[in-house]
Image (cartoon, rainbow, N blue to C red):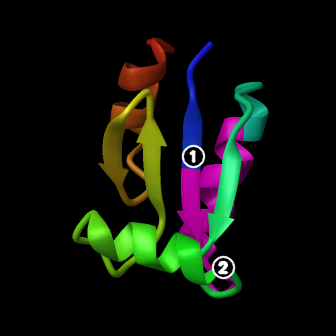
Amino acid sequence: MAKVTIYTSNTCPYCVSAKNYLKEKGIEYEEKNVQTDKEARKELMAMGHTGVPILIINGEQVVGFDKERIDSLLGLQ
């Protein structure tokens, strides 16, 4: 099973879309909210990102809600 982490914020519509998409596909994920979790914000910035959503799928970064890349990394094609 894929290990999926998604960095989100409270006001990000693409984060909601990405989480809903993963739920629809039956993919479990860990959510890290950068607005409420200072450590998550530090992790995100250490990766060189300031915007969300950022998904980490089996160690690979996906910037934004990129369905094709998400499907590819999860083997959903």
Determine crowd level at label 2: few under 14, some 14-19, many 20+ residues with C-alpha closer than 10 A.
few
Task: Give the residue drawn at x 68%, y 56%.
Answer: 31
Q: Earlier in the sequence, mark 2 or mark 1?
A: 1
Q: Is residue 37 above or below residue 1?
A: below
Image-quadrant location for residue 68: top left
Q: Is residue 1 magenta?
A: no
Instruction: State whether residue 10 is above or below residue 46.
Output: below
Q: Give how far apart the Cα atoms at labels 2 and 1 are.
A: 14 Å
Quadrant where the C terminus sits is: top left
- Position above or below: 56 against 33: above
Query: Is residue 19 found inside the magenta-colored segment of the image?
Result: yes
Q: Quadrant of residue 6?
A: bottom right
Q: Nearer the viewer, residue 55 or 76?
A: 55
x and y percent of residue 62 in the render? 34, 47
The residue lying at 66 percent from left, 79 percent from top is 37
Q: Residue at x 48, y 65 (%)?
A: 53
Q: Secondary structure at mark 1?
A: strand
Q: Which residue is mark 1?
A: 5
Number of numbered discs present?
2
- Quadrant that contains the N terminus: top right
Residue 12 location in percent, x, y? 59, 79
Q: Amino acid at mark 2?
A: Asp
The numbered mark at residue 77 is: none
Name the residue tied to disc 2: 37
Q: Range of the magenta residues?
A: 6-22
Residue at image position (56%, 75%) is 39
Disc 1 marks a residue whose amino acid type is: Thr
Where's residue 66, x and y in %?
38, 47
